[in-house]
Image (tube, helix red, strand yellow):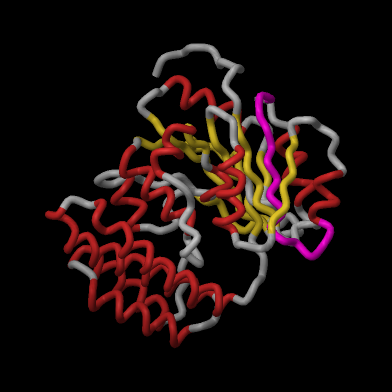
Amino acid sequence: MSQKSLDNNSLVSIIIPAYNAELYLKTAINSILSQTYQNFEIIVVNDGSSDLTEAVAKQFTDSRIHIISQSNGGMSSARNAGLRLAKGDYIAFLDADDYWLPKKLEKQVMLLQQNPNLGFCSTQTRVETPEGAFVNDWLCPVISISTLHTIMAETAAISGSASSVLARKELQLKAGFFDEALTGLEDTDMWIRFSAISDYCCIPETLTVILKRSNSVSRSLSNMRTSGLAVLKKNRQLLDKKSQQQFWRSAYASMLCDYAKWEARSGFTFSAIKHTIEALANAPFNKGRLCLGLLLSILLNRSLD
């Protein structure tokens, strides 16, 4: 890696999709305004909020903040609305209930400036409760065959997901908009499309913080599983033909095991066992051993950490 100094002339467009985010939006925006890299624009997309989200955004007088409102269309619709207005050389997303640590943009912009082969990057991420209690660290992925294979095998591979990613504008233009037909994992779908045409790197330093809220776990897990399968099917053709069949089985088994872990941790033991057995039926040998170990841990009520 060359050691050129940071070029502050690159504009970063930061898109914040916000739906009923009055309790969190101020923290998110303040975390951007506190960045050591200051050449940015903020596009807040009020996605049909019924609370004071728009009023909170309008409290800020910084001329770099732009606010648009639309009827509720969902996360992908809001992100796409922001993308259509983005003028930056780089694109970043920040969910309204997440926030950044001060050097996040500086380190990511420098990484992409110094490595023209990279199209996008992310950072290690800390997960917190809304009260600020530590939940866990979301570490950088270990890339196996390629970034594409890794993301498809592990739907949560990109740590921090949307809130941690910085991408070149030209990569975003090539990949297109977020898929508004998906009801979950829209960001994973985008990272798969990114990784099919670009290299990726993760900064192994906690620079992004995301909030874990206690929504309906069972409904959320069911939706994520359905969405995960839809994303895998949609992007299967991006793999070379030789690896499609075997890798499909491995990726599907990994997805089922991931959700089985969440179900077991949330107390849905029967569903967790069911999905682990289904994973075993689809998994190639090496993945099958991991699934079997998971099944035994669930049955014996062992820790899944």
Residue at position x 19%, y 58% from top? 244
Q: Position of residue 44 (x, y in %)?
A: 70, 45
Judging depth in this view, the residue of 303 and 206 nearest the camera is: 206
The front one of 117 and 212 is: 117
In the picture provided, is 252 more to the left or to the right than 49?
left
> As drawn, is 146 to the left or to the right of 257?
left
Q: Is residue 66 visible?
A: yes
Q: Quadrant of the N terminus?
A: top left
Q: Position of residue 55 (x, y in %)?
A: 85, 51
Q: Is residue 52 left or right of residue 122?
A: right
Q: Residue at x 66, y 29 (%)?
A: 40
Residue 94 x %, y %: 63, 46
Nearest the eye: 285 or 164: 164
Q: Which residues are magenta?
A: 38-52
In the figure, 148 relative to 41: above or below?
below
Residue name at image x 23 percent, y 52 percent: 239
Q: Is residue 164 magenta?
A: no
On the image, which quarter does residue 61 sit in?
top right
Question: In the figure, 106 relative to 249: above or below?
Answer: above
Residue 216 location in percent, x, y?
62, 76
Residue with the most extreme bottom position? 270
Q: Residue furthest left?
A: 242
Looking at the image, which residue is at 41% across and 33% down?
119
The tally of labels here is 0
| Observer able to see residue 97 | no
Q: Is residue 41 magenta?
A: yes
Of residues 198 and 216, the one drawn nearer to the viewer in this rendering: 198
45 displayed left or right of 275: right
